[in-house]
Amino acid sequence: MIFIQLILAHLLGDFILQPNSWVADKENRKLKSSYLYFHVLIHTVLSFIFLWDLKLWWVAVLVGISHFIIDVCKLSFQNDQTKKRWFFIDQALHVAVIGVASLYFGEFNFDFLKNQDFLKILMGALFLTTPASIFIKLLLSSWTPVTEEENTQTESLSSAGKYIGILERLLVFTFIVVNHWEGVGFMIAAKSVFRFSDLAQAKQRKLTEYVLIGTLLSFGIAVLAGILIK
């Protein structure tokens, strides 16, 4: 499959064989940076090597040209505030080009969208993201964690609780779908160690009860979803 071969070439060229000094020089000098052209040349050569077929020379050239265009757009439009966003856009576009090339050779099709088992698992996973978060938030809306003093609250990352909940539900769901229930126990134990030790130090019973109810709801919904899908 040329998809796997080109992805390997991309990973090597974009991460392994691109020093941080090259990245910094490209960001500072943009089109004037010689490292930009070295970088594109490396991607083209790696694509040739991994494909190892002279008839597919145009695929390697296509990868190199598209890589140059995508990188130039990224360097031209990104700034300090949007750098992270442009990194993911850049990677998505590179993979999309490889995907289109693979589609041309008939390596992929969309028959999986007719697979009922796949659709059920996808449905369960999607439910456990934002929809489940909203359900849990509504169920807990009658309680509010109360602290003795606002300044005693420890600082937390923005929306960290939401994303932690989504990740833990998806992991629990995955463990159940692949028949590894012991992983669920590991998740509960890990959550208890890292979360409830902090709450014990805070010595706030209402907050502890609030977090415990939320955690059990989160795990319970994930377990129920996994059982229903199975």
Image (spheres, grey):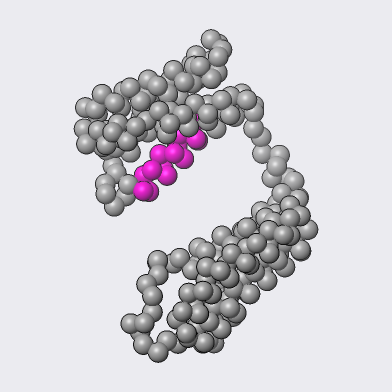
Figure check: 11 above or below 83? above
Quadrant including the C terminus? bottom right
- For the point 76% across and 55% down, the residue is 179
Residue 71, image x, y percentages: 35, 33
The one of 78 and 195 positioned closer to us in this rendering: 195
Q: Is residue 186 left or right of residue 26?
A: right
Residue 178 in the image: state x and y as whole percent: 73, 52
Residue drawn at x 56%, y 25% as measured from the top left: 5
| Residue 175 spot, x, y in % from top left | 69, 56
Outermost residue to the top: 54
Q: Is residue 79 left or right of residue 84?
A: left
- Residue 97 is situated, as x and y percent measured from the top left of the image, at 49, 31
**Residue 91 within the segment the image draws in magenta:** yes
Q: Is residue 29 above or below residue 126?
A: above
Query: In the displayed structure, would residue 180 be above or below residue 142?
Result: above
Residue at left 66%, top 34%? 109
State the quadrant of the N terminus: top right
Q: Magenta stretch: residue 35 in it?
A: no
Observer-nearest of 175 and 75: 175
Which residue is at a point 45% across and 24% down the rendered structure image?
63
Residue span colored magenta? 84-98
Depth order, front residue of 71/198: 198
Quarter of the rendering containing residue 130? bottom right
Left or right: where 147 falls relative to 188: left
Residue 62 visible in the snapshot: no
What main secondary structure does the magenta stretch of the protein show? helix
Q: Visible in this render: residue 191?
A: yes
